[in-house]
Amino acid sequence: MLSGIQVLRAAATAALALCASAAFAQASIVSGPPSDPTCMVPWKSDTKFVKYPKKNGPYRIALVNGYIANTWRIQMIKTAKAYTAQPAVAAKLKEFKVVSTGEDVPAQISAVNNFIDAGYDAIIVDAQNPASFGPAIRRAKKAGVVLIAFDNTLDSEDAINVDVDQYGLGVLWANWLATHLSNGGKVLEVRGVAGTSVDTDRHNGFQNTLNATGKKWDAVQVYGKWDDGVAQKAVADAIAVQGHFDGMSAQGGDTGVVRAMLDAKHPFVPFGGETENGFRKLCAQYGSQGLKCTSAGSGPGQVAVAIKTALAALDGQTIPVAIKLPLDVTDDSKLKAGVNYFPNESDNFFVGNSFPTCGINFSAQEIMKQDQGNQ
């Protein structure tokens, strides 16, 4: 039997070993280029590169989502499950856990902390409120856990961010309206979920670009939560109160926005929107009648890139701390059935969902057969 002093010494030795292990597992800033330069493109020319000590798999990875009550988030969850079910990916995973915590920010932070405490190797997050993640980021770093943020990213070089240029999307939509409205005018901006970095970045890009044109704009804002039903009601109410709009832009829920115009018999106007299949169907149908559209966005498939990045980091590869993904962009004049929109598929499917440079491309059928629940 060990004496009390021996027990204390053993505990101290174990604690020191744990600390040394945690320190060893932390990432180091290294020189580029990235191990996968085609997929993992640095955000800027001065983006730093990081390398974690290689871990032996298979790995335990968790996806901690926040808001889920729209088609983008549902498709994102299903895409994550479709990707991790692929034999080559599944072979690297001991466990893949999915949790959606809704709009409750403390609940999402708590979920991240729980996975850190449970010893997961990597955690993927779509942050409900990125400004609240500071303590969780520090805990993950101390524990040597790979933390990957996508879509709504984290303002920290202690996490790896994977995203498209959300601010640039707002710029693109504003420029589309400015090109089609030579004298400015009254425009409706349908925003996403308040407090998220995606909504803020897209809104800032949109507003700043309109203001920089020197034209006179009257921009009315409503929140559609990137959801067809919510956006449709918000736009119907805006039309009822405001009357005519000269142009519209929506971050998501675009199919609902067009349906609100149809229901209100509002004339078709230039529209800058996301990549929903239903929106593109309507743009193809009504483009010749005045619904001039640009459809651009960030497919839910970026979650698969985030998982791929986590696996690469755990394998000891060199990773940019901020990875920039390409946008999917088209307009009503370039829409082709069966190519960039699908008349026989669900409206609730984001078409711009492939990242060929990362070897990620799913059919609607592969994704939609997955379930959206926690696992």
Image (cartoon, rainbow, N blue to C red):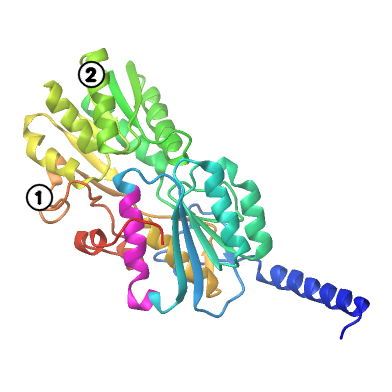
Q: Nearer the viewer, residue 241 or 187?
A: 241
Q: Magenta residues: mostly which secondary structure? A: helix
Q: Is residue 362 left or right of residue 53?
A: left
Magenta span has 323? no
- Quarter-wise, where is residue 96 in the image? bottom left
> What SS does tag 2 mark?
helix
Vertical side of 146 occupied by 283: above or below: above
Q: Position of residue 312 (x, y in %)?
A: 49, 71
Q: Is residue 336 left or right of residue 79?
A: left
Look at the image and tell me whether residue 253 can be seen.
Answer: no
- Quarter-wise, where is residue 194 in the image? top left
The answer to whether the residues at label 1 and label 2 have Cβ atoms under 8 Å apart is: no
> What SS does tag 1 mark?
loop
Look at the image and tell me whether residue 225 can be seen.
Answer: yes
Give the number of the disc on residue 343: 1
Mark 2 sits on what residue? 239
Q: Nearer the viewer, residue 82 or 268?
A: 82
Q: CA distance from mark 1 to mark 2?
A: 28 Å
Q: Position of residue 327 (x, y in %)?
A: 32, 50
Vertical side of 252 occupied by 209: above or below: above
Q: Position of residue 224 (x, y in %)?
A: 32, 32
- Name the residue: 58% across, 76% down: 54
Vertical side of 190 occupied by 361: above or below: below
- Name the residue: 40% across, 49% down: 164
Amino acid at pointer 2? Ile
The first of marks 1 and 2 along the sequence is 2
Give the quadrant of the N terminus. Answer: bottom right
The magenta stretch is 73-89
Magenta span has 79? yes
